[in-house]
Image: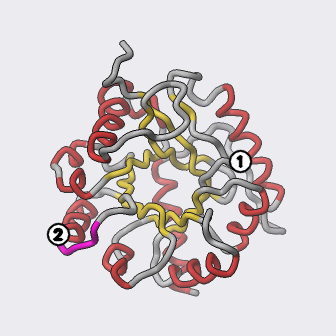
Amino acid sequence: MRGQSAVFLGRQPVVDRAGNVVAFELLFRSSPECGCACFSDDRLATAGVVTRAFRQVGIRAVVGDARALVNVCAETLMNRMIETLPPEQIVIELLEGVHIEDRLVRRCRTLKARGYRFALDDFCHYREIYDPLLEIVDVVKIDILGLGPAPLAALVAKLRSWPALLLAEKVESPERARECRELGFDLFQGFHFGRPVVLGRHPLGAGPERAQLAAARRATLRFSRAGRSERPMSRPQFPADRWFHLLGAAAGRRLCA
């Protein structure tokens, strides 16, 4: 029943260099027609997404075998509720507004030791205060929208000191997708690869979402590096162990660079 407290769930695909969908970011939506996240409380928005995806619909129905990126504020991170989520299928996405302090870093290390994976959201500028988190997180999501070619290249070069996967987010055109690929990004997210789809409005993996993903994979293959054999998967899913394979490969490239 739709009411003031109703919560709808959106998801946006994350693809790898071959155009395979390796994860979905789960997004709060207040209505099936809502195209943006409209809320004033990060904690309540996360609680709504978790309840909808994990308790009501079921995470396997939402993302299949892929990983689910769940936005988490500092308060939610400290809550034991986060430990009820399956570490093998989620990535805890730390919101850009989190205050980096010893308590938060210790909590991340504790959860990492328990098998949880982390992403750092909306990264635009490097500062030394981020170093403790950069040593922990598995993915750094770089917001490319406000970064020109030179600042983006400089930021990517700086982040190669850590083994995290680099994800280009807010990729909205073929030109920017090509630029990010040439810079060596591991993962990609944005309107060019697929707009957020509100679950319940369309069947999962069908209709507009399927068309977007197919177009994105074709575009990805067009600017694949010469000589590489990168083929899209037949379905927008991947085994959970592929995520760990990507992490290991990225770590090796950083250490050998």
- Secondary structure under tag 1 reads loop
Residue occupying the far top of the picture? 1
Q: Position of residue 232 (x, y in %)?
A: 71, 48
Contact flag, marks 2 and 1 (Cβ < 8 Å): no
- The quarter of the rendered structure image containing the C terminus is bottom right
Q: What residue is shown with label 1? A: 232
Is residue 23 rendered to the left or right of residue 20? left
* In-front residue for pair 149/193: 149
- Secondary structure under tag 2 reads helix
Q: Residues within 10 Å of mark 2 (few under 14, many from 20)?
A: few
Q: Position of residue 170 (x, y in %)?
A: 60, 56
Is residue 61 rendered to the left or right of residue 105? right
Q: Residue at x 46, y 26 (%)?
A: 31
Badge 1 amino acid = Pro
Mark before the other along the chain sequence, 2 or 1: 2
Disc 2 to disc 1, C-alpha distance: 42 Å
Is 37 placed above or below 1 here?
Answer: below
> How many marks overall?
2
Badge 2 amino acid = Arg
Q: Position of residue 143 (x, y in %)?
A: 55, 64
Q: Which mark is residue 103?
A: 2
Q: Residue at x 73, y 69 (%)?
A: 179
